[in-house]
Image (cartoon, rainbow, N blue to C red):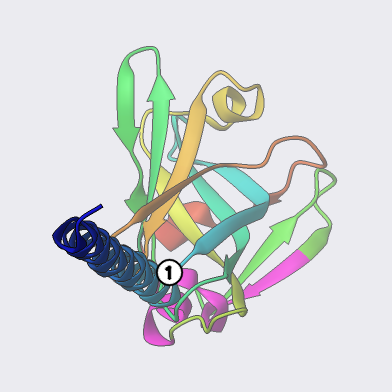
Amino acid sequence: MPNRNYVFIFVVVFLFAASFGAWRDEHHNRIAAETAVATNRVENTPSLIPVPEARAITDVGEEKKNSVLVVIMTIKNLGAPSVADRFALVAETKAGSIQGIPVPPAEVTILNDHNGAPRIKLKRSDYLPEKATNQPIPRGGEVKGFFLMYVPDVTREEIEKGRVDIKGSFEDVMGKTYVFNLPYGGPQMQFLDADKLMQSPR
């Protein structure tokens, strides 16, 4: 074989190897960059977990056609530090969706069991729309508290017997919405002076 053929083959093999090496390096660099971006996104994204633990319901008004719910819950965070904000509650009825209206808490709210005996004392300092908004939940941390919602045109009986589907929600610092179902089962708790609570200054 003439020497120039060897030279030609050498040049072709060299160019192929160089091109393959450049492609491989570019491919590895792109994968590394994409991995770094994904890792950075995960590390800087909150991952909140709602854990509703208990609820209390009471009737409101002379005709007892409205209700106020107290939701006790823990919010855990597996991601970047974040507040929990914009707490909301929606009741799904046969007539449509009913948006709950936030109720400011009293300094102390007492929840009673079905016999009327005091069972849980809630302090205003544990009111989640304030507690979880004023201080970010750290990575690996959690915050526990409660919030209250006035639900018009939905009775306590409808909620207790499961005739109404109620979901709660809140948002993290990135605007992501977390939806959760209210807990059912267990002893039903109630609280007193709901009408007085509804009339308190906002």
How many marks do you count on the picture?
A: 1
Q: Dividing the picture into quarters, in which one does residue 191 lie?
A: bottom right
Closest to the observer, 44 or 191: 44
The residue to which callout 1 is attached is 42
Whole-percent x, y for residue 37 in the image? 32, 71
Whole-percent x, y for residue 177 in the image? 35, 52
The answer to whether one can see residue 192 in this image is: no
Q: Is residue 183 left or right of residue 18?
A: right
Q: Is residue 172 left or right of residue 124?
A: left
Q: What residue is drawn where x is 49% and y is 34%?
A: 166
Whole-percent x, y for residue 61 in the image? 43, 40
Q: Which residues are magenta?
A: 120-135
Amino acid type, label 1? Val
Picture layout, residue 185 above or below residue 116: above
Q: What residue is drawn where x is 38% and y is 78%?
A: 133
- In the rendered image, residue 154 lying in the magenta stretch gets the answer no
